[in-house]
Image (tube, coloured by chain):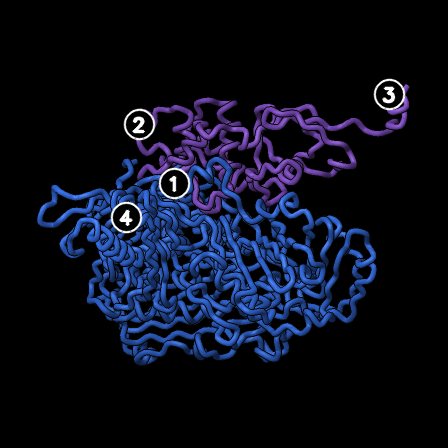
Amino acid sequence: MVARSGKQACKGKKPPVKIKVNGQWHEFEPGRDIEPAMTLSFLLREKLGYTGLKVACDEGACGACTVLMDGKAILSCMTLAAQAHGHEILTIEGLREDDPLIQAFAKQCEPGYGTALQCGFCTPGFVMAAKGLLHENPKPTLGEIKEGLSGNICRCGCYAGIARAVQHASHLDCVAEGEGAVHSPRKSAPKGGKP
Amino acid sequence: MTPPRPYKPRVPRKFIGAYRPRIDALEKASGRAEFADDLTLKSRFPGMLYAKVLRSPYAHARIKSLDAEPARLLPGVKAVLTYKDPELSSLKPTSAGWTDGVDTVSYERMMWGHFRDRRVLGDHACWATDEVGAVVAAESEQIAEEALKLIEVEWEVLPFVLDPLEAMKPGAPIIHPEIAPRNILPKDAVGGKDVFVDKGDADKGFAQADVVVEAVSVHHNATQASLDNWCCLVDWKSDKLTVLSNSYEADQSRMHISQMLDLPINKVRVISSYVGGQFGRGDTGDQPFFLFTALLSKKTGRPVKFKHSRRESFHDSRQPAIYTGKVGAKKDGTITTMYFKSIGNSGAYADHTMFALKFAPTEITEAALAHIPNVRMESYGVYTNKLPACMMRGVGNSQFNLIFGHVVDMLAEKLGMDPMDLALKNFGHEWGGLPDKSLAAVLREGAQRIGWSAKRHKPGAGPIHDRVKKRGVGFSFHPAWHAEWQEARRGEIRVRITVNPDCSVSLDAPTIETGTGSNTCNVLGCAEALGFLGITPGDIAWPHTVDTETSLKDCVQTDSAVSYLQSEVLAHAAREVKKRLQEKAAKLMKAEPEDLDIAGGRVFRKAAPGKGMSVRDVFRKGDMLPVVVEIGRPPNAEKTGVPYIANFAEVEVDTSTGRVQVLKLVVLNDCGTVMYASGAEAQQIGGQVMGVGEALTEEIIYDEAAGVPLNFNWIDYKIPTMADMPDIEPTLLEVWRGAGEYGACGIGEGTVTCTPRAVLNAIYNAIGVRVDDIPVKPEKVLRALGSVKKLMTHTEP
């Protein structure tokens, strides 16, 4: 009876939004923890403290807020928190520090390519976008890397180092591919502007 | 494609000059590095309020009346301050150009004190989105935004002007009549008068010249576009104000707040952690929003956070400048006379307009034009109702290089010379002869790497690819401007080395971590200087956060000069560390300190190197007190001249669409000494995103009829992505040498400077007609080619 009356009291109340983040399920009560217009980036940062993802443009133009949803790279600023209901989110905090991509980004210093990061603000977004790319395509070509990561902006301009790091992380034999592969002129015309 | 060619150090060293990862790379790659927005989550400051400021919807307007009462009544709103409140109205008029970031200065000594044109939330809106009238603090950003909408404002809409040439005409709307009665910024103490360089007799020079060329180049208002939007949290409790922000100059931010709010310096604490990109953004923290956020905190007794949205982060830009250049020479290519005139669009506030238009070109004259007998430069900074122009990477130099490289290329063609030969015949610096060795090195290396002699052809006369595409090569060069003597204004640079009893090292050489690589340079410099301890960079703890309460004065992240300025002082500090350790060891070893030496972590008698003790044992067996050395030294002011930088570009122009594709860039810097090779190459490569963006795609576009900006977002303001960027070959050289231990020169800022002109000269080489204004959009190329008659611009009503 108690349970029933409780249920009746809850009539019309929406069920909690359940999201699995970095392996752990969280429940968010509509109206209290989560609002219809709340973005996933806001929820992850402000409610759960996952500050690895950054909100730089808040309109899907820069990729700094990239996380994985069910293994696919998404822009968390363009995803409503409620849309993640029942899904599995992976933020950069969910990666181990010995993750090949994190290590490759951190270690990049090869002559001719610079480092893979400078200020580091865009880096978690790039790492997660690259994670999503490698899920779909474990051994991307340089052209595929450039295309796959062209939704992300690095204003410090470390694109050559980033591409090189992704190549290293994807276990491509860079030397066999041709030294300086990152710097080879593209065969096809690049895309104009951003996607 | 040639494989990467690592630079070869002139003096091999253990750590300085290395290709190695950044010291903060893992922290940043793993997402652990925390930026201002991360450190100011509500969960960390539960009582925190959010501030939002009223912005003008009009290009030019005055607030006739304002009723904030409806906003105050909105639940969740905790405070509203308006321009009528004495807290705001009593604040002194100010400028965001207090300092160029080199030194800390007071209100009285601010760099552009002639142009104190900013009120902290006044009633006069000078550009669309200007911060005016009122600011709100509320429990959430949404409530604060909602409250702003409830404020009833009666605007007096004023006539506006966007174009500097229009703004100079009689009858134009006057924006700051008390400062510039004709919108033209008057003579000032730093920049000088309108004709600010007048060496020899330029007119006579032109009259006597065998050959004269004249050209116009137009640089536009690109913006810094740091990913990390301005953010600050101010907590003003009782008499103490604490600011956590992503300002890149802690000491100057503290000075600014202290002076504007009339607080003792020791009652203001400024903390900066990681900053997500700087690029000159918003100058150095002299921003009105620090002040109104502080006043809201005082009023509410709660911490208040103010953060720009992306749109609001379109906050200042490079100074657009229309440059005329004229050069006269003898038939043999000896340049006898040069004349440059610029009309700059200051936008709504003067800020650093005259740094770009007068200060930087004066420095260039001193260096690159030292051997030209007749030089005249004149400049007009003009107020308009556009986004204000402030500091941006390569301030003034980028604009100047666009015309400088233009007239050099034109003159060479008219004389039938290779522009490289023309450059070497004429440009050096005041303290050296001709040809300048540094300039010769960057040009020869660049030419070789781009394939200059093979790829260069007569303008427009190269082979055609894919039926409609034409290729060309071009270059531009510029004197660097970050040699140590040019940094003398910084005054004493202080560092502190603490060698702990276990020989681990705590380093206090504060400089805010904005990504430039300076902190890595400092750690490498410290490890290098303390080489006698047998330590590695991993043994050194460096300051991730700069805190004016606990840190020494920060060396500001400007001029790319922090890469060596602190390392120079660290070299001196390390000598003192060694001396103190010898004194410590002498007591234990019953020797005279001068008879001892230290190497590889061991102290030994010079006479008997085999015998001795480890430095650790000196601590363990002695007093176990760390050795702490704090010293300060001003930059070495010895006039060593400056090295040169250059960019070479190869482009492909599609003559059917007008689209320009940069195929390759070679970026050359004579560094004096490479402090950190991977970081330096990252700067060379990275700067090209800004350089190519400014040359081809980035531009702030206005609705000319309404006076409002249209593309304050990154979908329409086009920053190059990975897919847009060409092959880039970073090239580090060590030819010139400055003073001191390393004799290095800052390089990062200048990597942007030569790119647009190199690309434009390459376009000319490809198609044989010039496009004189950037960004070079396809329609401009088509117009230059005669494919379209008129550029698509606004039509007369």
Which callout, 3 or 4, points to the residue nearer the camera? 4
> Which chain does the numbered disc 3 sit on?
A
Instruction: Give the label on residue B622, or none.
Output: 4
Image quadrant where one finds the C terminus of chain B: bottom right
How far apart marks 4 and 2 lie (CA) works out to 54 Å
Q: Secondary structure at mark 4?
A: loop
Front one among B321 and B7: B7
How far apart marks 1 and 4 lie (CA) works out to 43 Å
Instruction: Give the label on residue A3, or none.
Output: 3
Instruction: Give the labeled residue for mark 2.
Output: A175
How far apart marks 3 and 4 lie (CA) works out to 73 Å
Amino acid under disc 3: Ala
Q: Secondary structure at mark 3?
A: helix
Chain letter, colour purple: A
> Which chain does the numbered disc 4 sit on?
B
How far apart marks 2 and 3 lie (CA) works out to 67 Å
Amino acid under disc 1: Thr
Chain letter, colour blue: B
Front one among A100 and B547: B547
- Whichever of callouts 2 and 1 sits on the residue coming sooner in the sequence is 1
